[in-house]
Image (cartoon, grey):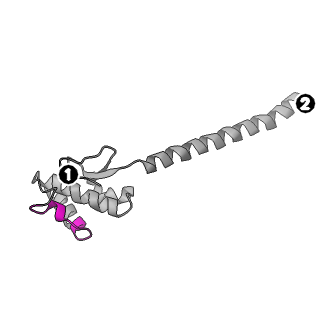
Amino acid sequence: MAKSVLLLPVFYLFLLLLSVISGITSVIAQAQLLSQKTWCVAKPSTIELALKDNIQFACNNINCSPIQIGGVCFYPDTTISHASVVMNIYYQANGRNYWNCDFGGSGMISFGDPSYGNCKYD
């Protein structure tokens, strides 16, 4: 009887220790994810009207010269490309929070740099 009474607190202490270790591991993993560079791009399935709305919204809040004629990101001259560029500029300018890439469900976080040629997604 004395052994089982003694084992119960040891068992609870063991569970508590596992819980703390698990929590620390989770915090470390989240910190690594947050420190990783991310970009915001338009989902390929997004309809044209939503992409145009995203461009208008973003350009009301950030500098959209990169997608203007002569801008470093003008080509390819497609709505999805232009939307992705300005959505990312907006996302980066507003702290890279996941909610700054939502755009009504038409944005997605990318873990790979979508830059191409002279068009840099900084």
Q: Where residue 68 sits: x, y (%)?
A: 12, 63
* Residues drawn in magenta: 57-70
User: Label 1: few (<14), some or many (≥20) within 10 Å?
Assistant: few
Q: Is any part of residue 20 visible from this angle?
A: yes
Amino acid beneath label 1: Thr
Q: Amino acid at mark 2?
A: Ala
Image quarter hosting the N terminus: top right
Q: Earlier in the sequence, mark 1 or mark 2?
A: 2
- The residue shown at (33%, 63%) is 93
Quarter residue 82 falls in: bottom left
Seen as rendered, the residue at the extreme right is 2
Taking the spot 38% from the left edge, 55% from the top edge, the residue there is 98
Residue 5 location, quadrant: top right
Residue that numbered label 1 is attached to: 46
- Label 2 secondary element: helix
Residue that numbered label 2 is attached to: 2
Where disc 1 sits, the SS reads loop
